[in-house]
Image: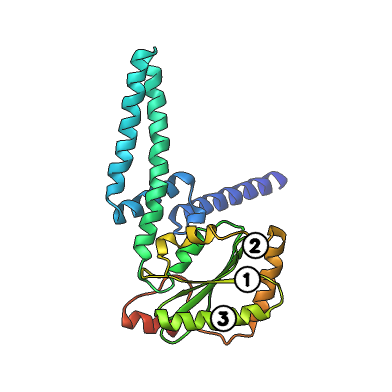
């Protein structure tokens, strides 16, 4: 009986393991993917929005192989330097893929409501991100990040309406007693605005005014402020730019 039960348990564990393996294989969640599949998917998306990425990556690989091979003919053995060139070329191609993937991501979401969240996701774990802390019916949005550079409010939408929203939010945030300056940013491509592609770097370059140990405490105080806001049925992340899609997004559909 014990041996039969052990066999049954082994069979159940094997079946569960195979089921989990199949689930991960068919999953669309990047967290379930292996490193190789993640690279393949990043490559597909990048080349779809940035066809020149192939040229840059191929050029980096070929140039590395040629340079190392030439060196190999001068410093024997040449075949060893050929291998070095291939390995270095792959690393260079991966670096270029990462660089072009980031640019392709910005191009993919540029102009969409809520696209500031894409730049916010590029910030390190030192920053506490709070997407869409407030919005209006015209889909003008204010986001917030808290990190070494202080409290940063990011507005996207109509410049006039967004600046008014940012001013109101800055006053509310300054009423919370933490003694940290509030920085406001209008995302856009016009004067005195920060483009989506440069938003993350702009925030990273802000002078450090908060110690790492204080960030969580300040973020928790601000969540109390957020809890007093009226709930807005607005989905997270970039949203459709069409009128029909925008209306559906506001309704939370």
Q: Which residue is mark 3?
A: 169
Q: Nearer the viewer's eye, disc 3 or disc 1?
A: 1
Percent of width and height locating residue 221? 69, 74
Q: Nearer the viewer, residue 230 or 215?
A: 215
For the C terminus, the quadrant is: bottom left
Along the horizontal axis of the image, is 199 left or right of 153? left
The kind of secondary structure element at disc 1 is loop
Tell me the residue at 50%/50% (across/down).
21
Q: Earlier in the sequence, mark 3 or mark 2?
A: 3
Whole-number angstrom distance, CA of label 3 to CA of label 1 = 13 Å
Q: Is residue 64 above or below residue 70?
A: below
Along the horizontal axis of the image, is 84 left or right of 231? left
Other residues around mark 3 within 10 Å, as few (<14) / some (14–19) / many (≥20): some
The kind of secondary structure element at disc 3 is helix
Q: Which residue is mark 2?
A: 209
Q: Nearer the viewer, residue 196 or 118?
A: 196
Percent of width and height locating residue 80? 41, 18
Q: Earlier in the sequence, mark 3 or mark 1?
A: 3
- Disc number placed over residue 181 in the picture, else none: 1
Whole-number angstrom distance, CA of label 3 to CA of label 2 = 20 Å
């Amino acid at each position: 009986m014990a041996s039969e039960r052990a066999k049954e348990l082994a069979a159940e564990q094997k079946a569960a393991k195979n089921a989990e393996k199949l689930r991960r294989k068919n999953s669309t969640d990047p967290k379930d993917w292996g490193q190789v599949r993640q690279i393949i998917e990043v490559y597909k998306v990048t080349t779809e929005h940035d066809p020149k990425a192939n040229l840059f990556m191929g050029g980096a690989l070929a140039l590395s192989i040629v340079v190392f091979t030439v060196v190999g003919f001068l410093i024997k053995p040449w075949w060893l330097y050929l291998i070095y060139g291939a390995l270095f070329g792959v690393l260079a191609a991966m670096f270029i893929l990462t660089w072009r993937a980031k640019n392709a991501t910005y191009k993919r979401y540029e102009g969409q409501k809520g696209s500031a969240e894409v730049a916010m996701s590029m910030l390190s774990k030192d920053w506490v991100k709070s997407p869409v802390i407030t919005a209006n019916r015209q889909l003008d949005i204010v986001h917030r990040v808290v990190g070494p550079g202080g409290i940063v409010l990011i507005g996207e939408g109509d410049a006039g309406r967004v600046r008014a929203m940012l001013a109101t939010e800055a006053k509310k945030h300054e009423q919370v007693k933490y003694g940290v300056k509030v920085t406001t940013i209008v995302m856009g491509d016009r004067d005195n605005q920060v483009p989506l592609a440069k938003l993350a770097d702009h925030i990273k370059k802000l002078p450090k005014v908060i110690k790492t140990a204080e960030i969580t405490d300040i973020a928790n105080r601000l969540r109390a402020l957020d809890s007093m806001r009226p709930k807005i049925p607005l989905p997270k992340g970039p949203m459709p730019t069409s009128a029909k899609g925008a209306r559906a997004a506001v309704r939370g559909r």
